[in-house]
């Protein structure tokens, strides 16, 4: 997929959505890595909510995303490796998070969907020592 830097964000999102249906998983991830590296935060913030939902599934459970619960290295080692690299703390997904965070973009997410210990910490105003929780 060619990604000229002057594309409109809506076109970028539409292209990524189409690719998620039409391209093999490995190619989708390669394209996402290129998009994350090449596009500025201003354009990436429009695709972030879609990307999170397409990976982790929807909050209502209708979309399963990449079905991470069922992904096993023994069953599908290539796909497992691709996902692990993409979601690694130093991988493209976290690079995207930090890129957006540096530009001060914010996204709403219900506290009720967070894991119990994290939810309790936030409700008690005790934030984990991570830059992800301090903005």
Image (tube, rainbow, N blue to C red):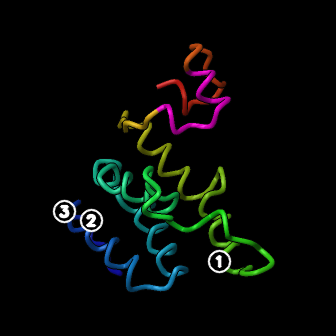
Residue 44 in the image: above or below residue 110: below
* Quarter of the view holding residue 7: bottom left
Label pair 2/3, CB-CB below 8 angstroms = no
Label pair 2/1, CB-CB below 8 angstroms: no
* Viewer-closest of 129 and 118: 118
Residue 70 left/right relative to 97: right
Q: Is residue 92 magenta?
A: no
Of all residues shown, which one is farthest toward the right? 74
Residue that mark 1 sits on: 79
Q: Is residue 90 left or right of residue 64?
A: right
Question: Label 2 neighbourhood size at 10 Å, few (<14), some (14-19), many (20+)?
Answer: few
Frontmost of labels 2 and 1 is 1
**Upstream in the sequence, badge 2 or badge 1?**
2
Q: Specify the quadrant that holds the N terminus.
A: bottom left
Residues shaded magenta: 111-122
**Can you tell which quarter of the image residue 72 is in?**
bottom right
Checking the image for residue 42, the label placed there is: none
Between 18 and 4, the one nearer to me in the picture: 18
The CA span between labels 1 and 3 is: 30 Å
- Cα separation between marks 2 and 1: 29 Å
Counting from the top left corner in percent of width and height, residue 26 is at 55, 80
Q: Is residue 115 magenta?
A: yes
Residue topped by disc 3: 8
**Badge 2 is on which residue?**
5
Instruction: Count neighbours of disc 3 (C-alpha within 10 A) and say few if under 14, some if 14 to 19, many if 20 or more.
Output: few
The location of residue 67, given as percent across then percent down, is 58, 67
| For residue 40, side relative to residue 93 (left or right) | left
Element type at mark 2: loop
């Amino acid at each position: 997929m060619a990604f000229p830097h002057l594309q409109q964000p809506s076109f970028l999102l539409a292209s990524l959505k189409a690719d998620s249906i039409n391209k093999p998983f490995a190619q989708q991830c390669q394209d996402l890595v290129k998009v994350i590296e090449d596009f500025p935060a201003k354009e990436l913030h429009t695709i972030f909510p879609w990307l999170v939902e397409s990976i982790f599934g929807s909050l209502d459970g209708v979309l399963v995303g990449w079905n991470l619960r069922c992904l096993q290295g023994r069953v599908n080692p290539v796909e497992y490796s691709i996902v692990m690299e993409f979601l690694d703390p130093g991988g493209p997904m976290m690079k995207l998070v930090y890129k957006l965070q540096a530009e001060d973009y914010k996204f709403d997410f219900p506290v009720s969907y967070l894991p119990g210990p994290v939810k309790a910490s936030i409700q008690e105003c005790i934030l984990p020592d991570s830059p992800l929780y301090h903005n």
